[in-house]
Structures are given as structure tokens and as C-alpha cells.
């Protein structure tokens, strides 16, 4: 479990709502962006490289990894620190219109829970976003979130259950907690106890790859 909460729920460092991740490979950097299949990462500060350099974040490392492995995909990072499911739901339709993505990595909900939002509303927003993404013809990777235990077992367990139930009842790829490999490891979390360090980012990406890789060859 994560050790704290303020930095996650209240971090408001703003990033461009949707920005292509730099591709340093000469063969793919000059390719037509219109022709390259795209992956949108739609998350909060955990995906927006909060507290570290952008090129140290797992989303940037994902683009470099795919390029090195000769997957000609373009990553669009549409993550914003402090984002909630309600904010994401408002932003998503225009994003899907602007970016024809084959895959959307949906990593939202943690800020809602840390603010004590109703579980029913969090679930409603997540399901609505998944429906929009599927209607746009994109595949969804739903990334599960967790919160500290000080919110009480009923709320904490109920929040985790939302993701499991959505994963079981919708046509999405369900990924358990994004920070499973780093949350309790010394040196892997920033002082706020919420955000992973630069050192942890490759492990975060490593956790995601088994869920993403099966989709890459199908597009």
C-alpha cells in the first residue's frame, strides 16, 4: 500500500493534455505520425512523471522500449497531475476525436479515492470512459489503483473491488495495481510515499508490458 496521500491528491503540476512522447530513433522519428498506430496513456501524476524529469518517467521509457524493439508505435501522453475520473471523462471525447488511438491505457481513480469521492461515482465515470474508448474502436488497458488503509477497510476494499468488477464485466485488459513492484521497496518511492522515484520507473514499465505486449502484434 502507499504510505501517504497529500502529494497525490493535491498535486496540481499541469502538463500538456496530450503530447507525443519524443522518439529518438532516426528511422521512426521521421515517419508520418498519421500512419503510425498510437497508444494513449490517460492517467494522473503516476503517468505524468510527477517529481522527476519527463524522460525518466515510465511513459517516456515505453516509447524508447517500443522503438528499440522495432515496434513502430507512437505514444501520446495525455496524463495530468491531480486528474480525477470526472475530469478525465470531460477531456476524453475531444481527445479521442483528435487522436485515432489503437490502445488506451486508462490509469485514473486514485485522486478520487484520496478525496473520498463516492465509490459509485468513481465506477460510473470509469465505465463511461471505457464505453467511449471502445466506441472509438480502441482497446483498453484498465490499470487498477489502491489507496492507503487509513481510509478504512470498507472504503479501501470497495475501491479496489471497483477495478476487479469492471475488469471482469467489460471487454478490457485488466492490470492490477501499477506500483505493485515498487510501493513497499525502500528507495523506490518519493518522500510523499505516493509517487515512484526515477529509479522505480523501469520496474513500473516492466509491470505493464505483459498486459500491453499481446495487443501490439494485433495492430
Image (cartoon, rainbow, N blue to C red):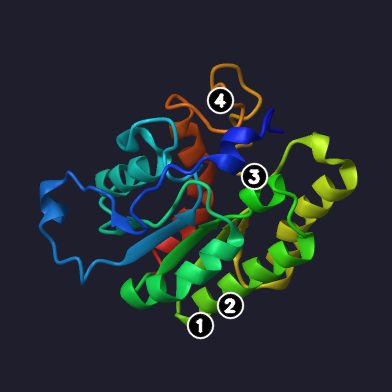
Q: Secondary structure at mark 3?
A: loop
Q: Assess whether mark 2 and mark 4 are in contact (beta carbons under 8 angstroms).
A: no
Residue bearing mark 3: 177
Q: Earlier in the sequence, mark 3 or mark 4?
A: 3
Dot 3, crowdedness within 10 Å: few (<14), some or many (≥20)? Answer: many
Against 200, is 213 above or below?
below
Q: Position of residue 72 (x, y in %)?
A: 25, 58
Total marks drawn? 4
Q: Assess whether mark 4 and mark 3 are in contact (beta carbons under 8 angstroms).
A: no
Q: Position of residue 64 (x, y in %)?
A: 29, 43
Q: CA distance from mark 3 to mark 1?
A: 26 Å
Q: Earlier in the sequence, mark 3 or mark 2?
A: 2
Q: Assess whether mark 1 and mark 4 are in contact (beta carbons under 8 angstroms).
A: no
Q: CA distance from mark 3 to mark 2?
A: 22 Å
| Residue in front for this viewpoint, 18 or 203 | 18
- Residue at image location 49% in from the left, 33% down from the top: 203
Q: Position of residue 122 (x, y in %)?
A: 70, 62
Dot 2, crowdedness within 10 Å: few (<14), some or many (≥20)? Answer: some
| Residue in front for this viewpoint, 175 or 51 | 51
Q: CA distance from mark 3 to mark 4?
A: 15 Å
Q: Earlier in the sequence, mark 3 or mark 1?
A: 1
- Badge number at residue 131: 2
Q: Position of residue 76 (x, y in %)?
A: 34, 58
| Residue 117 located left or right of residue 103 | right
Q: CA distance from mark 4 to mark 1?
A: 37 Å
| Residue 59 located left or right of residue 180 | left
Q: Earlier in the sequence, mark 4 or mark 1?
A: 1
- Badge number at residue 135: 1
Against 132, is 46 above or below?
above
Q: Secondary structure at mark 1?
A: helix
Q: Earlier in the sequence, mark 4 or mark 2?
A: 2
Amino acid at each position: 500500500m502507499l504510505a501517504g496521500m497529500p502529494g497525490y491528491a493535491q498535486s496540481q503540476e499541469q502538463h500538456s493534455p496530450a503530447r507525443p512522447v519524443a522518439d529518438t530513433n532516426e528511422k521512426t522519428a521521421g515517419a508520418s505520425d498519421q500512419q503510425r498506430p498510437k497508444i494513449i496513456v490517460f492517467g494522473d501524476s503516476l503517468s505524468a512523471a510527477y517529481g522527476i524529469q519527463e524522460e525518466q518517467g515510465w511513459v517516456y521509457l515505453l516509447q524508447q522500449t517500443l522503438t528499440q524493439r522495432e515496434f513502430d508505435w507512437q505514444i501520446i501522453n495525455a496524463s495530468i497531475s491531480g486528474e480525477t475520473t470526472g475530469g478525465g471523462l470531460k477531456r476524453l471525447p475531444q481527445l479521442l476525436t483528435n487522436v485515432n488511438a489503437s490502445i488506451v491505457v486508462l490509469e485514473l481513480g486514485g485522486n478520487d479515492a484520496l478525496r473520498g469521492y463516492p465509490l459509485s461515482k468513481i465506477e460510473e465515470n470509469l465505465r463511461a470512459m471505457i464505453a467511449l474508448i471502445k466506441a472509438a474502436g480502441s482497446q483498453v488497458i484498465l490499470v487498477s489503483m489502491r489507496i492507503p488503509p487509513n481510509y478504512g477497510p470498507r472504503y479501501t476494499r470497495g475501491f479496489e473491488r471497483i477495478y476487479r468488477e469492471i475488469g471482469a464485466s467489460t471487454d478490457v485488459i485488466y492490470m492490477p495495481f501499477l506500483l505493485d513492484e515498487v510501493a513497499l521497496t525502500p528507495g523506490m518511492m518519493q518522500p510523499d510515499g505516493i509517487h515512484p522515484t526515477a529509479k522505480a520507473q523501469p520496474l513500473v514499465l516492466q509491470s505493464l508490458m505483459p498486459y500491453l505486449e499481446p495487443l501490439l502484434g494485433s495492430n
